[in-house]
Image (cartoon, rainbow, N blue to C red):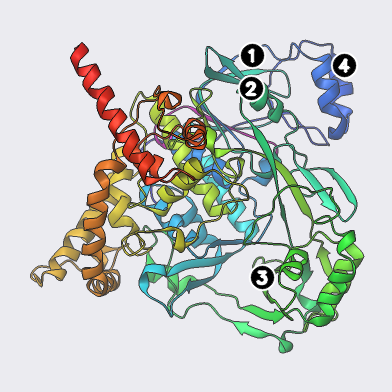
């Protein structure tokens, strides 16, 4: 485990629980301006009726003042990365979560990585993030996807023990110095003179902050749908963040929309006939996600579990087709967009009527549980129909459901309202990361959470933001895509989105990005010394300078296995990469050319009304970003360049 701080790791937890039975920590307990009898009545209330009563009757709230440099709202995959990175930058950080027992939960598929997603996890790890290290410790099967194709699209994926992943990430937060955890709900943001300066929580208490990062996931005004039933919830049996949406719209001027997603049923492994399925094994020589994992020791102790493959059939499809009107996907109650590339089984059957079967991957959820996940069977059907549908599938004829699938709808903020730093354009020092920006997936969320956390920290420290380019990383592509093009459905990353994918592979994430992590202060001296030894040795072997090479033990956690693979891949693509690099350098001049924030596009008469509208909506930061906006033509970019030159000359004359 990489050590990021020489300071002793101290657990600083302050809890004000809103769940029954109520227990309030004696550590930093805020005093309420109310009588003891009223407080006792409040503590006896079920949580579902607390918010309105609390806000109506305890508006004055708590009088103890708290002050942090950064406050993170939410402790999912985005919130965990954001909070850890801020604390590791030496900033006094608070993470607010509705439930401390739900930190880094995996409510959907308990897997990390996948096509392009695996590249992002390795990039986060190279800069100093946490997801890769936790995945290596909690993974129960590791597989390199696309291994039959070229190395440019090889993508690591790991099936995880979902409880262990959550426990390990939670412990990482608890052990991190300069980081405190508070169980409560953020009800509003405090904005003064165009800057966020604090958060108000459900108790009525105000928490002052220099910067705030919002990472609310599916909890923002969340609603769960089960067939024709629907009720409030951020996840099943977990309450939503009910008040923050109002503040984001009213106090911060953000436009919110609604997206949805679905989950799959979980069934008991003892009720499955695996003889009717195809076994899916992990790699014989698995590769870890983290660059800091000692690979030989890790492989020696890793116990991989198999996954299994089965299929839907015509009987399954008929059950779904006959009951589409009962699904929450189609009855009109969930009227928002769902992920195109992770659809419900109802949507797949509707979209592809010619298909007689669809893949269902049966995946274990952990070493110490009988629950298995039916990947590919996302659904919003009522419970009884889910049971019939499952029992129609080969190997699942007698399957017993432990948890049923459901649909969830939630608020998101259009990412056209944020800069590439993930700071909002409407309110200074307010950053958004994860599903609130209209994305889907743990990896996309963690990537944004990491960048939002870094940039919140840099803003507080008075330093320039971290902006990753499209030619540097998949994380940079993700952020550029959503902030430039916006989203009309939940965004998911693919290798096909990367025009420089020959250069930004999963194998060279450290060579591309570790210097950046070091410059921010997220890579320790010891780790960076090992990385430099690896990089120098790689150069020596590539140039056949084989005298005085270090041993594998001296290179560890890097290795000669890694060096040989890196050289093989580089030589395979060397000619293509040179051509790609020349193209990238040619485009870089315009790509990095800044556009003043106050540039008035409405005064450019040569622009069409649509072009003006798009440019004013996105407010691109560079010419390169402007060129990728939907409906902006090459001729528009030429005109914009001329106007910028004209403005530059006019300003130089004034000087």
Q: Residues within 10 Å of mark 2 (few under 14, many from 20)?
A: few
Q: Nearer the viewer, mark 4 or mark 3?
A: 3
Element class at badge 3: strand
Query: How much space separates mark 1 and mark 3, taking CA atoms?
Result: 46 Å
Query: How much space separates mark 4 and mark 3, taking CA atoms?
Result: 47 Å
Q: In the image, which residues are magenta?
A: 87-99
Q: Are marks 1 and 3 in contact (CB under 8 Å)?
A: no
Q: Is there any visible trace of residue 176 in the rendered image?
A: no
Query: How much space separates mark 4 and mark 1, taking CA atoms?
Result: 19 Å
Please state the horizontal and vertical placement of residue 370, each as a whole percent of the image: 74, 70
Quarter of the figure with residue 17: top right
| Residue identifier under label 3 | 364
Please state the horizontal and vertical placement of residue 165, each as a whole percent of the image: 58, 56
Element class at badge 1: loop
Element class at badge 4: helix
User: Looking at the picture, does residue 66 appear above or below residue 337?
Assistant: above
Identify the residue at horizontal 70%, vertical 14% (top origin): 62
Identify the residue at horizontal 45%, vertical 67% (top origin): 155
Q: Are marks 3 and 2 in contact (CB under 8 Å)?
A: no
| Residue identifier under label 2 | 28
Identify the residue at horizontal 72%, vertical 89% (top origin): 275
């Amino acid at each position: 485990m990489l050590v990021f701080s020489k300071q002793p790791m101290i657990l600083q937890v302050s809890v004000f629980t809103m769940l029954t039975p109520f227990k309030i920590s004696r550590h930093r307990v805020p005093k309420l301006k109310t009588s003891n009898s009223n407080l006792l009545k409040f503590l006896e209330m079920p949580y579902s009726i607390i918010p309105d009563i609390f806000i109506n009757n305890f508006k004055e709230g708590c009088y103890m003042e708290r002050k942090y440099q950064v406050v993170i709202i939410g402790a999912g995959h985005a919130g965990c990365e954001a909070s850890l990175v801020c604390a590791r930058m030496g900033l006094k950080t608070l993470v607010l979560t509705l439930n401390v027992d739900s930190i880094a939960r995996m409510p959907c598929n308990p897997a990390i990585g996948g096509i392009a997603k695996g590249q992002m996890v390795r990039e986060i790890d190279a800069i100093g993030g946490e997801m890769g290290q936790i995945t290596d410790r909690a993974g129960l099967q590791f597989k390199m996807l696309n291994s039959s194709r070229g190395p440019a699209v090889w993508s690591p994926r790991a099936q995880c023990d979902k409880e262990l992943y959550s426990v390990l990430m939670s412990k990482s937060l608890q052990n991190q110095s300069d980081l405190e955890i508070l169980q409560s709900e953020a009800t509003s943001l405090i904005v003064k003179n165009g800057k966020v300066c604090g958060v108000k929580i459900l108790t009525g208490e105000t928490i002052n902050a220099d910067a705030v990062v919002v990472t609310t996931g599916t909890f923002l005004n969340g609603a769960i749908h089960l067939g024709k039933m629907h009720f409030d919830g951020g996840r099943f049996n977990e309450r939503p963040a009910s008040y923050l949406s109002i503040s984001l719209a009213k106090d911060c001027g953000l436009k919110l929309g609604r997206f949805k997603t679905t989950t799959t049923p979980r069934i008991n492994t003892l009720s499955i006939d695996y003889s009717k399925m195809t076994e899916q094994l992990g790699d014989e020589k698995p590769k870890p996600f983290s660059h800091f994992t000692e690979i030989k020791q890790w492989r020696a102790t890793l116990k991989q579990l198999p996954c299994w493959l089965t299929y839907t059939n015509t009987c399954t499809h008929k059950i779904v087709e006959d009951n589409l009107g009962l699904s929450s996907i189609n009855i009109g109650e969930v009227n928002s967009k769902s992920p195109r590339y992770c659809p419900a089984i109802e949507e797949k059957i509707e979209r592809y009527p010619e298909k007689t079967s669809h893949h269902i991957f049966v995946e274990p959820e952990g070493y110490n549980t009988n629950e298995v996940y039916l990947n590919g069977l996302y659904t919003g059907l009522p419970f009884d129909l889910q049971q019939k549908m499952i029992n129609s599938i080969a190997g699942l004829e007698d399957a017993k459901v432990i948890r049923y699938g459901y649909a969830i709808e939630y608020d998101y903020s259009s990412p056209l309202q944020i800069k590439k730093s993930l700071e909002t354009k409407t309110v200074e020092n307010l950053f958004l990361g994860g599903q609130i920006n209209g994305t889907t997936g743990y990896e996309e969320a963690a990537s944004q959470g990491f960048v939002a956390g870094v940039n919140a920290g840099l803003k507080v420290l008075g330093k320039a933001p971290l902006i990753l380019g499209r030619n540097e990383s998949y994380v940079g592509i993700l952020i550029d895509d959503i902030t430039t093009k916006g989203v009309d459905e939940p965004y998911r990353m693919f290798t096909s989105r990367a025009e420089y994918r020959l250069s930004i592979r999963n194998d060279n994430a450290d060579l591309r990005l570790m210097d950046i992590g070091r410059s921010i202060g997220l890579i320790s001296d010891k780790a960076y010394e090992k990385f430099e030894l690896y990089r120098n040795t790689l150069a020596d072997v590539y140039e056949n300078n084989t005298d005085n090479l270090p041993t594998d033990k001296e290179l560890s956690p890097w290795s000669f296995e890694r060096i040989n693979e890196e050289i093989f891949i580089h030589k395979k693509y060397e000619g293509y990469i040179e051509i790609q690099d020349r193209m990238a350098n040619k485009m870089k001049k315009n790509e990095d050319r800044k556009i003043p924030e106050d540039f008035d596009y409405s005064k450019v008469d040569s622009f069409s009304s649509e072009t003006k509208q798009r440019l004013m909506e996105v407010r691109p930061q560079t010419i390169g970003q402007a060129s990728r906006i939907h409906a902006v033509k090459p001729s528009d970019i030429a005109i914009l360049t001329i106007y910028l030159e004209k403005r530059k000359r006019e300003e130089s004359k004034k000087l």
